Amino acid sequence: QVQFVESGGGLVQAGGSLRLSCTASGSAFSRSAFGWFRQAPGKQRELVARISTGGNIIYADSVKGRFTISRDNAKNTVYLQMNSLNPEDTALYSCNVVNYFAGITTNPWGQGTQVTVSS
């Protein structure tokens, strides 16, 4: 199992930006694909961005053009740069190992980091 520590969330006004970080444990980081997910109250968890071992990326339509996922294998860290935030982006954001093509994970979840966007 891989464990994650997410950080970088907070309260931001609409139109603002945040950069989330996710540091993973273990030595298999460079051989894994990762995804950033979010879950708003009363809604299902949504995969918003994923990145493969080779740097291929898929975004959900809801964040395309505004969010950027990246990875630093030397630091065992995945990032999510979020620009032009709007209140609909308010959610608990978490990262996890994913099957890149299926977009699913069976790994336990970490604590996540809360993002709140005020109008």
Image (spheres, rainbow, N blue to C red):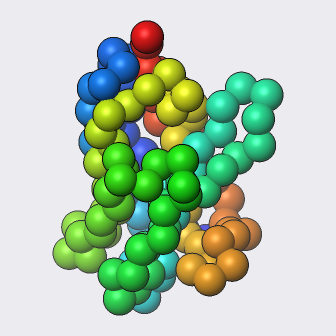
Residue 12 left/right relative to 25: left
| Residue at 76% over, 35% down | 43
Residue 66 location (% of width, % of height): 35, 47
Picture quarter with the C terminus: top left
Q: Residue 10: tell me if it is visible.
A: yes
| Residue at 71% over, 26% down | 41
Q: State the image quarter where residue 7 is shown.
A: top left
Q: Residue 26: tell me if it is visible.
A: no
Q: How many marks?
A: 0
Residue 108 against residue 5 in the figure, above or below: below
Q: State the image quarter where residue 86 is shown.
A: top left
Residue 82 location (% of width, % of height): 33, 42
Residue 69 location (% of width, % of height): 35, 61
**Direction top: furthest residue:** 119
| Residue at 42% over, 45% down | 6
Residue 86 against residue 70 in the figure, above or below: above
| Residue at 60% over, 57% down | 47
Residue 7 left/right relative to 95: left
Residue 17 against residue 26 in the figure, above or below: above
User: Between residues 117 and 1, which one lies in front from this camera angle?
Assistant: 117
Residue 108 against residue 72 in the figure, above or below: above
Residue 31 left/right relative to 101: left
User: Between residues 12 and 87, which one lies in front from this camera angle?
Assistant: 87
User: Between residues 42 and 105, which one lies in front from this camera angle?
Assistant: 42
Picture quarter with the N terminus: bottom right
Residue 89 location (% of width, % of height): 51, 32
